[in-house]
Image (cartoon, rainbow, N blue to C red):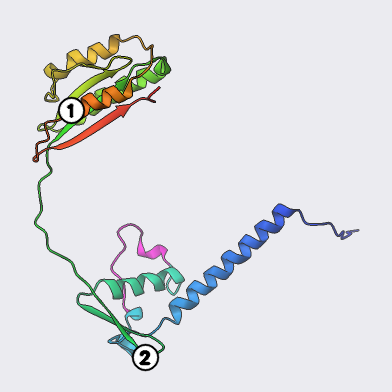
Amino acid sequence: MLAATSQPVPHGVQDMTTVRRLMALGTVLVLAAVITRSPLLGDPAGDNDPLGKPLPPDKDRPAATIKPGSAEDLLQKVAANKFSQDGVFTYQTKDGATLFALQVKPKLDPVSARPTDYVVLMDTTASQAGPFYFVQRVLVQGFVKSLGANDRVSLWNVNHRPIELTAGFVEPKPEKVNDALKDLDQVVTMGAADLKTALDRAIAGFENQPSRKQVILYIGDGM
């Protein structure tokens, strides 16, 4: 025999039920807003309704996975119609006022990427002992290898007395950076970081050339 008992519903269950009801209500309101959207002046009607036109295939998601007539399908079609056109958009409010939006898209000539000067500050203090420092060295080596031919890099050992390991900014070539990377491999992690002095000296070392970008990369926790 099955017996039904009445027990108080836990507070957490009540909250979850309320959230689900609110989410369901929100979905219904969104769908209703799409279907009953305010008419825009200049919109074609009848058989020329843009909602009846097929959309170009979605690059990020196959069109077959979007159910025709669903809220997502309607939203995509509305967005494709309203924001893929050039010119002026007009909208009439319920009070009869006409608003407009002018779509402006400047044509800019492509520019080549500027070369970059990188200052890499390597934390070699006691807080980096063990596997942390190993990961740091791997990161620095990989970062240097990823730089472009026109980029430059300056490697620093940041401790109680910050030390620049390269001769200023050098090209990211093995013969220019290998000695600095070997120095980092030989460091015994101890002491504390004078990060302020390291930053002051790193900033002062930039040449401030308008044709080059300047980046400071700090690897550590600043302790």
Q: How many marks?
A: 2
Magenta stretch: residue 6 in it? no
Q: Relative to 204, does residue 1 appear above or below in the rendering?
A: below
Image check: 3 left or right of 144? Answer: right
Whole-percent x, y for residue 13 in the image:
71, 55
The prevailing secondary structure element of the residues shown in magenta is loop
Tell me the kind of residue under disc 2: Gly
Residue located beneath label 2 in the image: 96
Label 2, label 1: how far apart the Cα atoms are: 62 Å
First to last magenta residue range: 53-66
Quarter of the picture containing the C terminus is top left
Residue located beneath label 1 in the image: 204
Using the image as rendered, state which of residue 130 and residue 67 is in the foreground. 130
Q: Relative to 9, does residue 148 appear above or below in the rendering?
A: above
Q: Looking at the rendering, which quadrant does residue 152 occupy?
A: top left
Image check: 107 left or right of 141? Answer: left
